[in-house]
Image (cartoon, grey):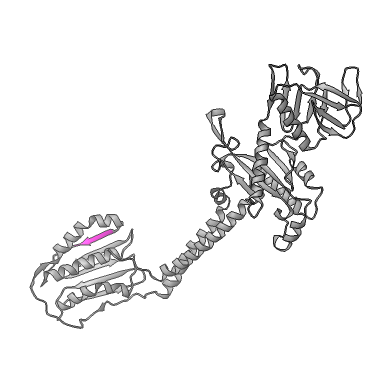
Amino acid sequence: MKKFRFNKIHKISLVIITSVLIINVVYTYKDYEDSKTRPENQLSMKNIVMNINNNLSSDYIFGDLYHLVKNSLNIYTDNHFVAFDNSLNPFYNSSYYMKNTLYYGSPEFSEEEKIINIDNLDYMVIKEITNYIKELYENGEKVIATFNHDAITDKDIIIVKEITYLSINDRIFIENKKENLISKDINNINSALGHYSYNGEEDSYFNMIVCNTYDYLETKLNDVVNKDKFDDNGYYEITYSDEKNNEHLTPIEYTIENDEHIKLNRKACFQKFGSMYGVYADKKNNKDLYQSSEYDKGYIAWIEYYTDSDLYTFTTYLSNNYINYLISLLLIIGSYFLIKIIVNEKTKIEPIDKPIIKQPKVKREVTNKEDVNLENKLTNLISSGQNLFIFKNIELNYQPNPLVVLGNEVELTKVINDLFYFTINHSIPKNKLDIKIEDKKIYFINNDYCILDNDLQELNDVFEIIEAHDFQYSFNLSQNSYEIIIDLNIRK
């Protein structure tokens, strides 16, 4: 089989294509990494958190960190989160959209207006109240609250304008002003950290599922901060693969309509709040300035819920930017054909009107001469090579005629074989070949393919045998065809 050789078109095209591919790979990697960090390509909760940092880095900040967080996250979200100040004290969570209340009515909850609103209490105070009520519930004790009041209506509804004193059983939580106190059995508590309900000794419960999630986030955040696990953007996450037995990260699987199976993944995410993590921050020039600012610093931890289709993957990136790679492909194809045209113009071979007859340089004596039936050998060669024509999709027009010459059978067989395979190797699919015997001449013609003078060097051994037998050869080369002629008439 003919050995593949690089010509000018191949070499120049290879350099250009390789250069374009390298540029594409470098650009694609950088652009993909940049795209992953854009807010529109983030999961919902992270997008909101990034926007908070963007606001902190802006020259126009309205309110402190607390109000930015509250205003950005004051709607219901499936993502449980806890926001912390710079000292790791929690100040807001995902349950704050609910009212924090104590209910002192009858166990049947028929009088819903009998509540005490404790929304104005600090997050840590509400957390202490919730944990203490949980402790009382586990010990089987009733919950009795003592608090200040402003008036009592005819329907036994206690009016409290502002909580200035609050104690539960023997623990005091608020003691600003100890006046007009009243005590009531607490049958129900709704808070951002848990839910307690008492309806008789055999019908009571305390729900701390959400509170347990908040405790997990708080514990993990302390570990992340102490070990400084945040990346350069102030972000860190823990996935299910990191903690296989973690109930807070185990994927949730369920089936919806049409028996469609849904797998909801979960991961714990942690982000620093600060001006330097916003899009408007000049991290290089103003890093010290941003680090010195304390009013906007803090942290947020949350559980992100997502499906695999929600993630911004490399496949998503390619589907969004396919036009760039289509243009690159067109540039590569266009470059190849442009180079081919330029090289062909420089190496264009003008058609030769008259055959070039090569005369032997050195005459050697041929031994073991005998009558050789070249027509028979060529016919057998073509017959045995039918599969090769089919494989290469080449059409052959063969015109045999009787041809017997005197010469060395081995050498003349080599001439026929080498010329036959040379013609096949220098053809491409859908070429039409003409091989014919006429007037003791053998013609090998391809009218759809071009070869160069250098290609004929492969036939030097063939030409030497022809010359030694006192035969002649010639060839015609043009831009789109070639013709090799072996004249087996004895040269006079």
Residue 412 percent across, percent down from the top left = 15, 70
Quadrant where the N terminus lies?
A: bottom left
- Tell me which segment is drawn in magenta: 395-399
**In the image: residue 86, left or right of residue 263:** right
Q: Could one spot residue 163 in this view of the protein? A: no
- 396 is within the stretch colored magenta: yes
Residue 441 percent across, percent down from the top left = 19, 70
- Residue depicted at x 76% and y 17%: 107
- Closer to the camera in the image, 468 or 359: 468
Q: Is residue 172 above or below residue 28?
A: above
- Residue depicted at x 12% and y 80%: 365
Rendering quarter of residue 167: top right
What count of labels does the image hold?
A: 0
Residue 32 percent across, percent down from the top left = 58, 54
Instruction: Name the main secondary structure of what is drawn in magenta.
Output: strand
**In the image: residue 113, left or right of residue 219:** right
Residue 349 percent across, percent down from the top left = 37, 75
Rendering quarter of residue 162: top right
- Residue depicted at x 79% and y 55%: 59
- Closer to the camera in the image, 20 or 261: 261
Q: In this view, does 67 lie above or below 110?
A: below
Quadrant where the C terminus lies?
A: bottom left
- Residue depicted at x 15% and y 63%: 377
**In the image: residue 38, left or right of residue 11:** right
- 416 is within the stretch colored magenta: no
Q: Could one spot residue 241 in this view of the protein? A: yes
- Closer to the camera in the image, 333 or 211: 211
Q: Going by the picture, which residue comes out furthest to the front?
A: 170
